[in-house]
Amino acid sequence: MAVTSLKEYIGVPRDTVANFNGKQLVYASWDRHLLFAAPFLTCVPPGMKFREWVEGPLTALIQPDPDAKSVDFSKVEWLKSNQAFTPNFEASLAENGIVHKEQIRFKTPNLNSLFAGA
Amino acid sequence: MDTQVTKKKLGLKERYKLLTRDLGWEPTHHTRDEIYPYVKYEGIKIHDWDKWEDPFRLTMDAYWKYQAEKERKFYAIIDAHAQNNGHLNLTDARYLTAIKIFLQAISPGEYAASKGFARMGREFGGVGTQVACQMQALDEIRHAQTQIHAISNYNKYYNGFHAFSDSRDRIWYTSVARSFFDDAMSAGPFEFMIAIGFSFEYVLTNLLFVPFMSGAAYNGDMATVTFGFSAQSDEARHMTLGLECIKFMLEQDPDNLPIVQRWIDKWFWRGMRVLSLVGAMMDYMLPKRVMSWKEAFDIYGVENGGALFNDLARYGITAPKGWDIAAGAIEHMSHQLFLGLYQWSFGTAFHGWIPSDDDMDWLSSKYPTTFDKYYRPRWEHIKKLEAEGTPFKNFGLAKLCQTCQLPTVFTEPGDPTLTCHREVDYKGEKYHFCSDGCKDIFENEPEKYIQSWLPMPALFSELGGDIGAWMDWVGLRNGIDNGDYVGSQDQVNFDKWRGMATSNK
């Protein structure tokens, strides 16, 4: 049963892409870089190139981390929906299969200044 | 003309019978199912409503008398507090961050509980239950009122209190408590009783109210201590009602057990998420601390909770599903949430701050195996950014959990260096969660939770990402209510007034 109810009940999803005025949500998180308390929320057009998203909002958001300057985005390991993923930097988010509310993660195995002792 | 006869005074037992049990009558025009349409759809089977035990045997007239008495005492103390500048007896105005969160997130929950119990008083089929729920509805609205009145005195002098009801509805960090109550109130009557009567009142009250009230006592907040005392005897009654209700369900029919167990699992987990606010308060917000969040959990959670679940074991109830995961996260949850509250403090109607060296030493001593290893390096880096003139603000906003609605700040069970990522595809939409516990709750009733109103996505879907418009809408005055405590009006004023009260300057 999809909900405990008196009779059949169908909910209306609240955060569908139609409500975002032509944009979509893309979440981003940098694995094991927990200066940032939670994954970032970005609201961007689906036609934005992956490179623009990385060099724009993502790069700006990670600046406070001491490892930010050492990140080479062409070499990091990417995950989409928690699965390994190879993005095409010149293609749009939509062409990369990045849908509304997609979670993108990236790993930088050799960088972890704030967890050096951990 | 008949001679007037002096009526015999009623004994307590007789009085209770007449004023409660005798109020129930057998309907003739409608069936019981028509009158009580919501008592069956959750699957709970009740065979005999009269088996409901009312442990306090309180009648409405006696209730009225006790409450009026307490009310008089309460307002006498609150008046004295106001007239004697009680706010200057606080250890430090930083303490008020805890009270702001309480007023914005918890007091409206009392009001929600009042509405919920008023509804349950109508929906339950037994008269003992109806009367008990009615009294609790009155208690809860009284708690909301006394809290608002007690705290309103601080609103005269300090920022962040003025828009608490808008904060409750609209701001982001309150949604963990709001969604807890919304979830309970949109459930059936039996689940509501487990959510509020059992989980909230019985399992969590010790961890919520006791730390708040002792925190208030330690930090010179007489107003909060007073409403705490005034509510205490009610809480004892509520806890008993919650426990009675759960025993009643379990004794009525063996088929009720799996349903009740699923609700216990769910509401324990939802309660733990609300408690993360309490953890952050105990470990970070009290200038003079009572005990660490971990110590409180060991006493009130592990010992008392353990005893309770041992007691319920004879009905077949086991400890809640997420218990071990919750216990394993106790070392981390307060640190993870406060780090978030600090970096998003441009969007909070209270002040944040970097823990001082003393604060951090205290945290190391309370969390010897985790604080220095995982959390101190981040604060040291944040201190460095502050010293360099580029204080850390995380303008990325946060991914929120679809169920508990907190930012997904929590880490993988067993790995405090990695954020817990959980997602579900349901009918072509993606949904994200902070934990397996919240994901399980969603998957049990997806049609309910897909409707969650999540504050951060709403900033973009409803206000086009305009932070200024959002601040107006949530009642947040930029530069006054939010941001760092150091240099805030609250800090400047408290220090000035306290200086006037304690020196000749």
Image (spheres, rainbow, N blue to C red):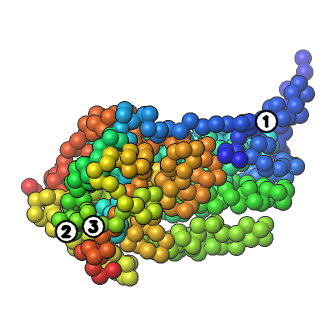
Q: Quadrant of residue B222?
A: bottom left
Q: Give the residue at x 75% y 46%.
A: B42
Residue B351 visible at all:
no
The first of marks 3 and 2 along the sequence is 2
Give the foreground label among 3 and 2. Answer: 3
Disc 2 chain ID: A
Alpha carbon distance from label 3 to label 2: 11 Å
Q: Give the residue at x 65% y 73%.
A: B307
Residue picked out by circle 2:
A70
Residue picked out by circle 3:
A75
Label 1 sits on a secondary structure element that is loop
Q: Is residue B106 left or right of residue B492?
A: right
Residue picked out by circle 1:
B36
Type of amino acid at the residue the image marks with label 3: Lys
x then y, percent, for residue A72: 22, 65
x then y, percent, for residue B132: 70, 46
A52, B468: nearer the viewer: A52
B15, B199: nearer the viewer: B199
Give the foreground label among 1 and 2. Answer: 2
Q: Is residue B47 left or right of residue B423?
A: right
Residue B297 visible at all:
yes
